Amino acid sequence: MKIAFVYDAVYPWVKGGAEKRIYELGTRLLEKGHEVHLFGIKWWEGPDVIEYEGMFLHGVCKARNLYVDGRRSISTAILFSLQLFPHLSYEKFDLIDVSVFPYFSCFTVKFVSILNKAHVVYTWHEVWDDYWYEYMGKAGFFGKVIEKAVSKISGDNIAVSGWTKQRLQKLGVPEGIISVVPNGIDLKEISEIDSEADCKSHGIANKHYDVIFAGRLIKDKNVDVLLRAIYLLKVENPYISCCIVGDGPEKAELMDLSNEIGVYKNVQFVGFQDYSSLIGKMKASRVFVLPSSREGFGMVVIEAFACSIPVVTVKEKYNAAQGLVEDGVDGFVVSLEDREIAQAVWKIIEDDTTYKNMSKAAFQKSRDYDWDKALSILKNIYEARV
């Protein structure tokens, strides 16, 4: 098959869950003998079309800011969708897989598919629905309308989780045209990365960090709540340690907050890390905390599980990551409140037996999310369509 992926952000120039998903599945489809193209913003220097690890990358438009004032740039999304047409329509593909967000490109892909008689699948990483009002205020009405419009033109959908599938159904998409292909991890790669610390197997001795967070430092991630939880934990353990991995518009504010509440000696802001360093830091930690109010999947949860560390996440309407954690088994799902997060973390780190049991359960669950399993499901879907 000749397959095209469409998404404005391209790995490894932009590193996120959706970008990594396309890269991992695309390179694996290549190994199966398929021809893979990716149409995105041109983040690289040189020709508009380059070959990268066997995939053909098409630079649709010049590099632009994806985010403005912490929000996805509407102008960038519109420009990408408009300039996508001549690039995508020039070649014929057996199948086009378009990542739905940020929506406008879906209409371009639909038109090209009719013109070139190509089958299209629409990959939904998350469904926002009423969250648009939280994101944009009254102007969120337009975002909600556009999302609904895409759901009406998408005759064949892939959801990255059962959670997202349920939200698609609530949006009015029939269950029969939704398939679930989860995000995954490379278990072999993770197993070969060394921990930063000299850790005992399934134990908590000699860990560098008690708590770790990894993600973009934006308001939705609620890292401020985590910092206040560390303040509470400091009462029980003055030497409690927390590692914050990531960068973003909230970083300066969060660092100021850590000074203000007196946990600056307990918290390390280490910035963006390459993948090996991130995994090494996870393996050197006792508990992963993800207090996000919005996650389309929560890849870092599965990566944490693969590092044999339990996860604490929160009960929030738009947080799909809570669907990955079995409360009391491989972590805890609690309210978005500093005291509850602190109590959950303390339950895990105060007792070595609890930690060992949760650690084993976490690692066992990670085995269900290997990329090769996801590829098998996706390949069957593709081959049934063409």
Image (cartoon, grey):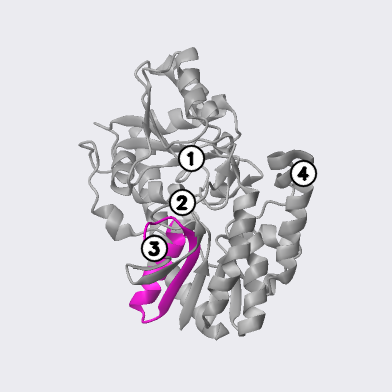
Give the residue number, with chain letter if any, for mark 4. 139
Q: Secondary structure at mark 4?
A: helix
Pick whichever of labels 4 and 3 is earlier in the sequence: 4
Give the residue number, with chain letter if any, for mark 3. 370
Residue 266 at x, y percent in the picture? 37, 20
Pick whichever of labels 1 and 2 is earlier in the sequence: 2
Marks 4 and 3 sit apart, C-alpha to C-alpha, by 39 Å
Asked if one can make out residue 228 in the rendered structure from this viewpoint, the answer is yes
Give the residue number, with chain letter if any, for mark 1. 216
Marks 1 and 2 sit apart, C-alpha to C-alpha, by 9 Å
Pick whichever of labels 4 and 1 is earlier in the sequence: 4
Q: Nearer the viewer, mark 4 or mark 3?
A: 4
**Label 2: few (<14), some (14–19) or many (≥20) C-alpha neighbours in 10 Å:** some
Marks 4 and 1 sit apart, C-alpha to C-alpha, by 24 Å
Q: Residue at x 24, y 43 (%)?
A: 201
Q: Are marks 4 and 1 in contact (CB under 8 Å)?
A: no
Q: Residue at x 61, y 57 (%)?
A: 79
Magenta-tinted stretch: 20-47
Label 2 amino acid? Gly
Instruction: State whether residue 380 is above or below residue 16.
Output: below
Label 1 amino acid? Arg
Give the residue number, with chain letter if any, for mark 2. 16
Q: Are marks 1 and 2 in contact (CB under 8 Å)?
A: yes
Q: Residue at x 64, y 46 (%)?
A: 318
Residue 380 at x, y percent in the picture? 49, 80
| Residue located farthest toward the left when viewing the structure as drawn | 198
Please tell me how many numbered marks the rendered image carries.
4
Instruction: State whether residue 76 is above or below residue 99.
Output: above
Identify the image quadrant of the C terminus: bottom right
Label 4 amino acid? Ala
